[in-house]
Image (cartoon, rainbow, N blue to C red):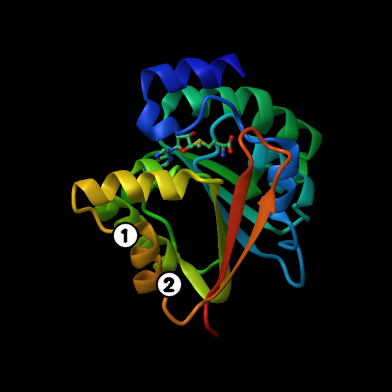
Amino acid sequence: MLTFLRHFFRDARNTGSILPSSPALARAMVHGLATGAPQRWLEVGPGTGPFTRALLAAKRPGDQVVIVELSKDFCTRLDADVLVPWKKAHPNEAGEVQLINAPIEEARLEPGFDHVVCGLPFNNFPPELVERIMVQLRALIRPAGSLRYFAYVGARTLRDGHGALHGAEPLAVIEDRVLAGCTRSSEVVVANIPPAKTTTVIFPS
Ligand SMILES: C[S@@+](CC[C@H](N)C(=O)[O-])C[C@H]1O[C@@H](n2cnc3c(N)ncnc32)[C@H](O)[C@@H]1O
């Protein structure tokens, strides 16, 4: 928790929160992913790893997990606190989990992911960056695959209200453009500080 707070004061825009997400939000973010044949999952912006822990708990032998995190500090903590212990407990699956320290915009990833779990604070980003990352994630996900991201309840209204003063495009317009043809649904998770809304996007087949 202190790691997160320290990080927020150093880089508020990219950290996006003073607290890591709750276990309830983590469960909602990974709900329903592990079905059918072995899959490839991508997690973007794990921070201290609440969603990573939930992903690893859901992971079956053969599922591949790629994790991309901007901050070196968060990567070091995530590796020490979550990945190393998990790999020790699951030595046969250790090679199926990969952590990459890079901004997602610069990560070179093989496309074809079944599911992307995204912890990025889109409401803090300039519209051009949101669009660039969403287009990139769309290109990385296979047909009929899914993308799930979250935002704090009310944050979008605040952001778009503030953005309107500067002529910035509302995020909903960017989502409508980039995610055209996709099915979208959302869920509110009140057991999080602050309460959050997840958005699940299913891409066309
Ligand atoms: C709101 S925090 C979420 C952390 C964690 N998923 C959680 O829910 O507690 C956002 C995370 O995204 C990371 N991040 C921000 N911009 C990024 C980028 N361009 N590429 C990869 N990670 C990024 C931050 O360093 C931070 O770990």
Q: Is residue 154 left or right of residue 71?
A: right
Task: Report crowding for label 1: few under 14, some 14 to 19, many 20 or more residues within 10 A (C-alpha).
Answer: some
Residue at x 40% of width, y 44% of height: 158
Hey, what amino acid is under mark 1?
Glu
Q: Quadrant of the N terminus?
A: top right
Q: Which image quarter: residue 130? A: bottom left
Mark 2 Cα shell of 10 Å, populated few (<14), some (14-19), many (≥20) = some
Which residue is denoted by mark 1 in the rendering?
131
Q: Residue at x 73, y 39 (%)?
A: 191
Return the residue at label 2: 179
Q: Quadrant of residue 64?
A: bottom right
Q: Where in the figure is residue 81, as x and y percent of width and height?
A: 66, 24
Q: Real-space Cα distance between discs 2 and 1? A: 10 Å
Residue 133 in the figure: left or right of residue 35: left
Q: Is residue 89 above or below residue 72?
A: below
- Of mark 2 and mark 1, the one earlier in the sequence is 1
Using the rendered image of the protein, determine whether residue 104 is visible from the camera's viewpoint. Answer: yes
Q: Secondary structure at mark 2?
A: loop
Under mark 2, the amino acid is: Leu
Q: Is residue 104 above or below residue 111?
A: above
Report helix, strand or loop for mark 1.
Answer: helix
In the picture, measured across the screen, residue 82 lies left or right of residue 92, that is: left
Image disc number at residue 95: none
Residue 68, horizontal then vertical, whole percent: 47, 43
Return the x and y of residue 35 as percentages of the image width and height.
77, 68
Residue at image point 59% right, 29% down: 48
In this rendering, position of residue 134 left or right of residue 54: left
Quarter of the image with the C terminus is bottom right
Residue 126 can be seen, yes or no: no
